[in-house]
Amino acid sequence: MSNRRSFINKMSLLTGATLAGGLLQPAWSRNLQAALKNAEGVAPGELATDDEFWYYVQQSYTISSNFINLNNGGVSPAPKVVADAMKTYYDISNEGPSYFMWRVVDQGREPLRKNLAKLAGCDKEEIAMVRNASEALETVIFGIELKAGDEVVLAKQDYPNMIAAWKQREKREGIKLVWINLELPSEDDTYLVKQYTDAFTAKTKVVQITHMINWIGQKMPVKKIADAAKKKNIEVLVDGAHTFAQFEFLIPDLNCDYFGTSLHKWLGAPIGTGLLYIRKEKIKNIWPLFGAGDKEDDNIRKFEHLGTRPFFIEEAIDKAIDFFDMIGAKRKEERLLYLKNYWMEKVQHIPKVKIHTSFKKDYGCAIGLVSVEGKTPQELDSYLWTNYKVHTVGIVWENISGVRVTPNVYTTTKNLDTLVEGIEAFAKG
């Protein structure tokens, strides 16, 4: 532990990650520290519109100046302190991997587990560290005990990886997948809940709920659906790939049994980091995705038996948590909501332009979907990139069609004005 303590102290000095005063503290860090101090006492909703404050947040990132990145929903860049920490962990590990990686760097796993659990609002014995949301959710999908004829309820608008995993079990084991088809966007909880509950039968064993439909940014009333499922002894799996650290909530408040997310999206952790939550009493019922002893083991660590892996990536998650806490969850949520509504309000009345995402906080946050009548999503996406160097993504999935726009805290309103200009020019032909 003394070796690790010395190592961490050295790393903090090298990265300037503590944001403390001193000769090694970079200018962007000093400026952000001053901005945070000036923001004390300012309501998050008011601060959301303060471009000067968020300019200093932007300086905490190393982002390309060659284009405007509005596809942060796919994967987001990490703040400088996170990237620097990862590089430093790698350099140290690489000096003697079998020693530094296992005896020094990996000793930070349990403190990290504790910090992630605090952020999630659960017991640390319910948190496993994985590589992404797909690995987290597929651990449950392939690990939960089901037999031929058992039913699983899910939506056609769920993420393809999860759908493919469930279809594999259907084909191999004879379980039955019961599909619902959501008409989105929706601001009607009664409608959304009813789509799921109407699909429940005496044979339903699991319901999968996507917390935010990633294609369109639709927030789902997870707890209401979960409460109804629990009354029928149906287990609840939540795909939280796009919600963890995007807006405020605690995992246990969703009343789910299982939850998976990617930390390289909204938390700003290194690429290839994720989190799996399993309610404590359910751990013994789930087979690990990789061989790790008995299924009946109730230790959450059985889901982390991946073999040799990049510890230097995993350990840098702690710096992402620090940065997230420093900015503040509510401040971040309000800023992301403001940015999404900022550009949507400017384009919603342009002829031929259609918005497919709710403006309301209960039904959306950062992600917005836009389309132009008579044009394909690919045409709009290509036009924005070619003419304005705005990076978005065209979406065509089931009954959803449009261009997804996903800003982050480093995005400026000036960036979004460029997006608006591009959409307007494209719509006018």
Image (spheres, helix red, strand yellow):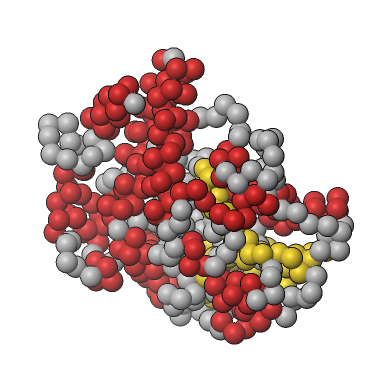
Nearest the viewer among 160 and 206 is: 206
Tell me if I can see residue 422 in this picture: no
Residue at 40% over, 34% down: 108
The spot of residue 261 in percent (x, y) is: 53, 53
Q: Is residue 335 above or below residue 187?
A: above
The spot of residue 104 in percent (x, y) is: 40, 24
The quadrant in which residue 2 appears is: top left
Nearest the viewer among 404 and 264 is: 264
Residue at 80% over, 53% down: 169
- Left or right? Give the position of 130 relative to 25: right
Tell me if I can see residue 56 in this picture: yes
The spot of residue 249 in percent (x, y) is: 43, 65
Tally of marks: 0
Nearest the viewer among 321 and 60 is: 321
The spot of residue 125 in percent (x, y) is: 50, 48
Q: Is residue 148 above or below residue 322?
A: below
Quadrant into which the N terminus falls = top left
Residue at 46% over, 80% down: 349
Q: Is residue 204 above or below residue 122?
A: below
Residue at the extreme top of the image, as rendered: 96
The quadrant in which residue 416 appears is: bottom left
Q: Is residue 106 above or below residue 216?
A: above
Residue at 33% over, 65% down: 330
The quadrant in which residue 185 appears is: bottom right
